[in-house]
Structures are given as structure tokens and as C-alpha cells.
Amino acid sequence: MNIVLVGPPGAGKGTQAESIIETYKIPQIATGDMFREAVSQETELGKKAKEFMNAGKLVPDEVTIGIVRERLSKPDCENGFLLDGFPRTIVQAEALEDIMKDLNKDIEAVVNISVPDEIIVRRIVGRRLCKNCNLVYHVEFNPPKQDGVCDKCSKNLIQRADDQEDTAVNRLNVYATETNPVLDFYAKKGVLINIDGNRARSVVWEDIKKALDKYDRN
Ligand code: ADP
Ligand code: ADP
Ligand code: ZN
């Protein structure tokens, strides 16, 4: 199954991705995680991405499209993949069509998680992340068993540099102008699935699972 997850920052994409990849055994391709990894390793890609990320802006399309094309061509994507946080612009969505054509594949479903802006800001400022396994926590809504420590690998949790209130507001504005048109793009293709993300994690997951089960070929 070839699936895309879209939704504003903090909507719960990474959180729901945890259930999706575990249930359907497909790799998660999260451009934000790939960029954060590159920034922390101080690679060329990381140097290109860092200033945009910290300002709450999008990394330029040509950079982002390049890393996604390369990643989707790897053998572990053969039986499906979950794109998380890509495409975020129309240019990226069109590039993804080309990549799919070259790989002889199709995007089967685009899951759009929506949450009101004021809830989102609370989710973003309380978000904590395990840098080791990319699991997502929230100090209030999804706390780890032990304060500041990952349940799975026991490493210390971090707060993302861009998870501040002012940057969060920038990112919401960028989403409204750059990414909203992507939703129309997929609605016209008939693959958009709208999910109300302003409910408990498990309830959101039930809805997503109901919608995605029919694409599971395993
Ligand atoms: P969130 O979890 O808040 O939705 P991500 O972890 O997906 O955020 O992305 C963090 C940052 O990485 C973005 O604000 C942006 O700077 C960069 N980024 C991630 N995905 C993309 C993309 N598809 N296009 C451009 N920039 C991206
Ligand atoms: P995204 O990947 O879309 O940016 P995340 O999955 O990282 O979003 O979630 C953002 C924050 O909100 C995290 O701290 C996460 O624990 C929390 N969160 C995710 N889903 C829910 C939910 N259904 N209810 C409350 N908090 C949630
Ligand atoms: Zn961990």
C-alpha cells in the first residue's frame, strides 16, 4: 500500500504513523525526521535544511524532492510505504506523480488529519521526541512512563528546536498557503480521506484503520 499522511504540524501524523507502520509493515518516510537526522549529523543536506526549519519555513522543493525520490527507490518500499510530511507543496505533489510513474506505482490513499489551530499550538509546545527511535510523546497528552525518558529505548527525550509557539504559528501559516492546495489536488484525484484528528489517539487510529484496511495486500 502506497500511502500519504498530510495535516498541519502537530496534527498527529507521526503519532498515527506509529500505528500504521506497525499494522501494515511498511516503512515510514518522514521528511522532517530525515532533515532532523541530517542536521544533527551536520551533513551537507543538514546545512541546507537547518535555517529553513528553525524559521518554520519549508526546505526548498528541489532539495526535498531529491531525497524523497532517492528514498522511494530503495527496495524496502517495494511492497508499500507511508509518506509522512511529503508532499507539502503543489510542486512536490506533481514531482511525486512523476516519481510514481517512473517506479510504476500509484499513490492509493492520502490521509488528511485535521485539528483546529488553537489545539495544535498546545500539542506542538508540549511535544517531546526520542531522537533515537523517533517516537513521539507529549508532556500532558501522551507522557512517557518515566519523565523525559523514552519508553522503548530509555534514551532522553528532546524538544525540537522549532517547537516554540512563534515558530508553530509560522508553520501554520505556511501550511495554509503552501499545503492546503495539495489537499485539493488529491481530492480531485479521488484519493483524499479526511480524518478528524481532534479526538483521542486510539479513536483517530480506529478511523484511519477502517479507511486503510482495504489497501492492505499482505
Ligand atoms: P511537523 O511534524 O510539525 O509536521 P515535520 O517534522 O514534518 O513537522 O517537519 C519539520 C520541518 O522540516 C518543517 O517545518 C520544514 O522546515 C521541514 N520539512 C519537512 N518536510 C518537508 C517538506 N515536504 N517540504 C519542505 N520542508 C519540509
Ligand atoms: P505531527 O507529526 O503531525 O507533527 P505528532 O504526531 O508529532 O504530529 O503530534 C504532535 C503532538 O501532539 C505530540 O506531542 C503528540 O504526542 C500529541 N498528540 C498526537 N495525537 C494526539 C491526540 N489524538 N490527542 C492529543 N495529543 C496528541
Ligand atoms: Zn526511543
Image: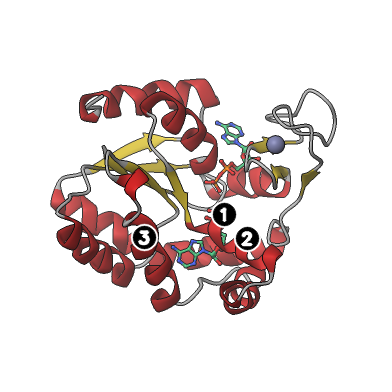
Amino acid on which the number 2 mark rests in the picture: Arg
Q: Are marks 2 and 1 in contact (CB under 8 Å)?
A: yes
Residue 154 image position (x, y, % from top left): 79, 32
As measured in the structure, the alpha-carbon distance from the residue carrying label 2 to the one carrying label 3 is 17 Å
Compare residues 49 and 186 and report the one nearer the observer: 49
Q: Which mark is residue 33?
A: 1
Q: For disc 1, does the CB lie below 8 Å from ligand 1?
A: yes
Q: Kindly state the secondary structure of the residue where label 3 is placed.
A: loop
Q: In terms of image quadrants, where is residue 68?
A: bottom left
- Ligand 1 has an atom within 8 Å of the beta carbon of the residue at disc 3: yes
| Residue at x 51%, y 33% (from the top left corner) | 18
Q: Amino acid at mark 3?
A: Pro
Residue 71 quadrant: bottom left
Ligand 2 image position (quadrant): top right
What is the spatial separation of the Cα atoms under label 1 and label 3, in whole angstroms?
Answer: 14 Å
Asked if disc 2 and disc 3 are in contact, CB closer than 8 Å, the reply is: no
Single out the residue that lies furthest toward the right: 147
In front of the other: label 2 or label 3?
Answer: 2
Judged from the image, the secondary structure of the residue bearing numbered disc 2 is helix
Please rate how many residues cluster around mark 3, counting C-alpha atoms within 10 Å: few if below 14, some from 14 to 19, many from 20.
Answer: many
Q: Position of residue 171 (x, y in %)?
A: 56, 63
Tell me the element at label 1.
helix
Quadrant into which the N terminus falls: top left
5 or 199, which lies in front?
A: 5
First reached walking from the N terminus: tag 1 or tag 3? 1
What residue did someone put label 2 on? Answer: 36
